[in-house]
Structures are given as C-alpha cells and as structure tokens.
Amino acid sequence: MTTASKRPAWQEPPTPVGLAAKGLVLTAIVAVVTVPLYVVVLTSLSPAEAVNRAGGLVTVPDGISFAAYQELFAGGVVTRSVLVSLGVTLTGTALSLAVTILAAYGLSRPGSLLHRPLLFLILLTFLFGPGIIPSYLLVSSLGLIDSYWSLILPTAINAFNLVVMRAFFMGIPGEVSDSARIDGANDWQILTRIVLPMSKGVTAVVGLFYAVGYWNAFFNAILYLNDNTMWPLQLILRQYVQQGQTLSVGSLADPSQTSALPPNLAIQMAIVVVALVPVVLVYPLVQRHFTKGVVIGAVKG
Amino acid sequence: MTERVAAPPAVRADGAPPGGRGPRRPPPSRRDRRRARRDGAAPRPPLRARLARDWQLLLMTVPAIGLLAVFHYVPTLGNVIAFQDYSPFDGFLGSPFIGFDNFYWLFTDVSFWQAVRNTLAITGFQLLFFFPVPILLAILLDSVMSPRLRLFVQSVVYLPHFFSWVLVITLFQQILGGAGLISQTLRQNGYEGVDLMTNPDAFLLLVTGQMIWKDAGWGTIIFLAALAAINPNLYEAAAVDGAGRWRRIWHITLPGLRPVIVLLLILRLGDALNVGFEQFFLQRDAVGREVAEVLDTFVYWRTLVTGEWSYGAAAGLVKGVVGLVLILVANKVAHRLGEQGIYRRS
C-alpha cells in the first residue's frame, strides 16, 4: 500500500474502526455535495415519461433525452440570457484583469512616487462600502441604467484581488527586473515580457475569481436592469426555476393539487445545469493554484 | 500540501492598517528597519527625478484608481443624502437638508430594529455552527494520508464556493423544498411531505446549512495552510512521549491553529453586520420578513420599492459606520493579542 509508506515511523497504524469511520465521514461529505448535482443533471437528461414515472426528480437513470436542452437552445429567453451572461463575463473579466494587473504592478515597488497614498486609497475600500442607495443613484446619474456596463464597471476592480496580485508581484526577486532595466527595458516591457509570463498561476486564479463573480452576478442586474429582455442567466434561473418552484410549493398547500408537478421539470433542471457548467468546466484548470492565491491574499491583505 | 507562504516582510508593513494613527508600539523593528534601509541606502531623489523614474508605474495605476474613485468614493460622498430630504428631481444640490431627522425616524422604526436583530442572530448562529466546521474539516482532510484521495475530496468541497446563491438556493429547494426530493420520497412511501424552505422557525438552521454547504470547504484552505506550517517534529516528540492521536490534536494541532482561529474569529465579529445580501433577498418572500429581513434587504426594500431614498441611505450609512467601527476595534484587539491585523473580506 502506498499510503502506509507515507506514515512516519512514530505514528501508530490506523485502527480498522478509525479507518472505517473516517471513510464513512468522507463519503458522506462528498455525497452531500455531489448527490444534488447528480440528481439535477440526471433529471435534466431524462425524457418526460421518466420524470412522470419518478414522480418528480429522477434518481435512477431511466432513458436519456436531450429534449430539454434542445428546447432551451432553440432560441428564446434562455438562449439570449446565456449569451448576455457570456458576453458580460468575457468582457468584464478581460477588463478587470487588465486593470488589476496594471495597478498591481504599478504598486509593487515600495518607495515609488505616491506609492503609499495610492495603496492607502485602495486598502481603504475594504473598510467602508458606499452603500446600496448612493451607488444606485450614481449609476443612474451616469445613465447606465439598462446598460450592460452597469454590470461591469461598478464591480470591475476588487481590492482583494488587487492585493493578491500585488503580493505575488512583490514576491518576484528584484534582481529579475533590475537586470532587465540595465538592459534598457522600461516598466511596461518588464511587466509584459518578464513579470506576466512568471505569473500565470496567480493570473489564472484572479481571472477565475473575476469570471465567477461576473457569471454569478445577480444583485447588480436586479438593481440596474429594468428591461427583462436584457436579463442575464442568473435572473432567468431565479424567475423560471426558483420562483416557479415556489409556485408549486404554494399549490402543495391545496390538497386537491398535491399531485400537480411542474410540467417542465427537466427544462428547469436543464437551466440549472447551464448555469453550473461553465463554472465546473473552468474550475479544474485553476484549482491547483488556489491555496497560493488565497493564502497570499489573506496573509498580506 | 507543500505550499509555502512566502511573505517578504516589507509587504506586510505596507498593508498596515490605515486606521491605526499615531505611533504603533508592536512590532517596532520591521517598519523602522525598512525605513532605515530606504533612507540610509539612498537619500530620496528629488521629485522630478522620481517622476521621470516612476511615471510609467503611476500611469498603470490610473485606470484602477479612476474606477475606484468613480464607483466607490463618489457614492461614498453621495451618502450626504442621508441628511437630506432627497428627491431625484431636485438632485443632491437642490434637495433640502433636514439634519438628523432620517436617523431619528430610523432609530424609532420597529422594522429597522427587527432587521438588526435578524442580522445579529444570523451572525451569532454562524459563529456557533458555521465557524468551527472548516476547522474540523481541515483537520480531517489533513489526516488523510493518500494525497490523491485528499486532493479529490478537496476538489469536491471547494466547488460549491463558486456557485451563485441563486443556484445554491435552487438546489436546496430541489432537495428540501415542498416539491423536493425528500418530500417526494416521503410521499411515495406514504408519509407527509415536509417543506423546510418556507418554515420561519427553521430559517436560521436553513441559512447556516446553506452557508456550510457553499463555503465550509473553501474555508478550509487557510486552515490547511496553517496545518502544513506546524513543525512535524512536535508531533513526533509528543508521540514519543506517549500522546495518542486525539491528544496530539488537542495539544499540538489546535494550538498550532490558534493564531489563525483567533484572527478569523475577530474579523468575523468585526464584520458582524455583513451577512450577505442575495441569500436573504432570495428567500425573504418564502419565509417572510419577520426572520429573513437583514439590514441590506431592509435598505433595498425601503428605498427602491417605496422610494424613500434618504431613509434608505441613512440606514445604509448607519450600517457602514457601525461596521467600520467594529472592524477597527476588531483589528485593535487583534494587535493587542499579538496577531497581525489584516484587512480581508471574509
């Protein structure tokens, strides 16, 4: 067994009971996260008869059908909202990353001109949020109501991500940039040719944080988008799945309608899956960098 | 995990709290040493030379500072409407100032205090039942010998952190709601269905359960890093002295985690008024505002729904100022206890 060889000599061998208990707890933890996802994905892929036969969510595979997805992507509300969310996420992440990288590098050399006051301005945003109402009034007076920029600009820069990035840049040995400067490189060249190629991991993590933030954004859209043809996916999810579900919960109170199921459960679950998939796809690519990013941010924020 | 936390001292000194005015006693050496190094090595060059040297760096910070100025500092100033009888037609300049009237009404408003009570109840409940979970989970994960298995479990438990609240609540509804999986199974076996999503009495349990499901795994990261930093010789010495598994956890693991635990605890206390907006906004209608109205949702509903701009801004300002004071106090306490004061979102 490979595991036994890793155990230091002084440590007592695990007891069978202890191992079994630990295995059970770990299995339970993994199941609590994965079972809901499994049920949702399975239901979204089940044909209508299977949903009816199961009397709701499908737990045992019973035929497969992509009908729900075909319907979702045949054009219409969900298709549009996915495009909106993708557009906002891609544009926003690109903008946020660019602004964050520039500022993080610009503030990565203590002793440079205005370094301390500028850093202070950024750190101060941790301490005091402007509040919902003044922010709304500002966005409104800038004419950004019912504009996609209202989903991007107010959250474009996150001080936490900036601090993580800056801490990483400061960890790069000064000799690297010094030698480049002697060779005649300016700061822009040092950043793009030397520092950035060394910072792929932290860029990936910060990029993921921003992208997930934009993809999941809900509150800004509720505040700033009155026109529901502009809604991103999360609002569609709420309207058609969460609130649709609340309606059927209400009908449960009426005994005559107890058996009434939401007719399009597979479609509802397919919307959930669509909201889920981009996150699950990108996640493994950056997962191994998490610890570094988070711990750097926590220690130095 | 073999991740190392490389922390050049200068960085921490720079991230020093802006709130701490005046001479700070501990730690005396670090900042002085840095300053001495900077001043001693080369006397500060004249402004023009520094500008010539650093103008590119300065230019790089312009977009970020500009965005923060417009979308953070301008609205912060916009809080003046809390002292006005603001109307959108008259604007900031035209609306009459009415002093502290909004605050007077706010502090005599029963529903405001209800929101404060709910917020504090949720924070308290989370401190008791959410806060220890990542610690225990981290100790459990750390005890898993096989790196592969550990990485697998870590990947699984980190994942929900990246789901939106809409998604998390939808998933909970599908499992625990009136038409959810549990009710469905119960009914098919001849029992009554249960609906845990609309029960006001179980709301604290429900939201804490959602918090745990979403963020407990993610919360282990910082504890796992602290665990990896504990000197393994300590465990060996304890084992040689006859300490068993549990005694080693009690006498070595937990003391090793103590600084991180104390720090996060203090920071959570400083953040007591922040419980998040979306989780409660999304469930407010289902369980009723008697239990689900928190300060943020109070501000939202009172203003954007009824149009009482100044009143909502006053409530938001009270929350912001109290939050600021709490964080500064928490940070002071952290310094007193000899911990690094840190400013991070929790």
Image (cartoon, rainbow, N blue to C red):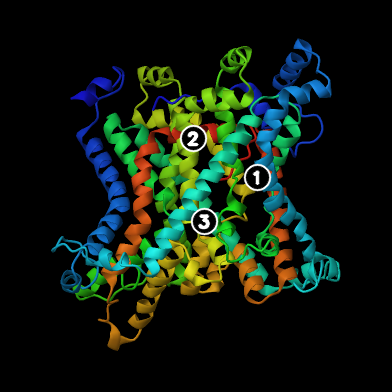
Q: Bin the neighbour count of mark 3 within 10 Å (Cα to Cα): few under 14, some 14-19, many 20 and up.
A: some
Tell me the residue at 29%/51% (across/down).
A34
Foreground residue among B49 and B155: B49
* Above or below, comparing residue A203 to residue A219 in the picture: above
Give residue A301's position: percent from left, percent from top.
61, 35
- Measure the alpha-carbon separation of dots 1 and 3: 24 Å
Give residue B27's position: percent from left, percent from top.
70, 24
Q: Which mark is residue B125?
A: 3
Give residue A200's position: percent from left, percent from top.
46, 30
Same chain, labels 1 and 3: no
Tell me the residue at 84%/20% (across/down).
B46
Q: Amino acid at mark 1?
A: Phe
State the residue lying farthest toward the bottom: A256
Q: Bin the neighbour count of mark 1 within 10 Å (Cα to Cα): few under 14, some 14-19, many 20 and up.
A: some
- Measure the alpha-carbon separation of dots 1 and 2: 21 Å
Same chain, labels 1 and 2: yes
Q: Secondary structure at mark 1?
A: loop
State the residue lying farthest toward the left: A63
Q: Quadrant of the N terminus of chain A?
A: top left
- Measure the alpha-carbon separation of dots 2 and 3: 36 Å
Q: Amino acid at mark 2?
A: Thr
Tell me the residue at 37%/73% (across/down).
A245
Please state the chain letter of the residue tagged with numbered disc 2 in the rendered image. A
Q: Is residue A27 left or right of residue B58?
A: left
Foreground residue among A30 and B282: B282
Q: Secondary structure at mark 2?
A: helix
Please state the chain letter of the residue tagged with numbered disc 1 in the rendered image. A
Nearer the N terminus, badge 1 or badge 2?
1
Provide the residue designation for mark 2.
A203
- Are the two marked residues, 1 and 3, in contact with CB atoms closer than 8 angstroms? no
Provide the residue designation for mark 1.
A126
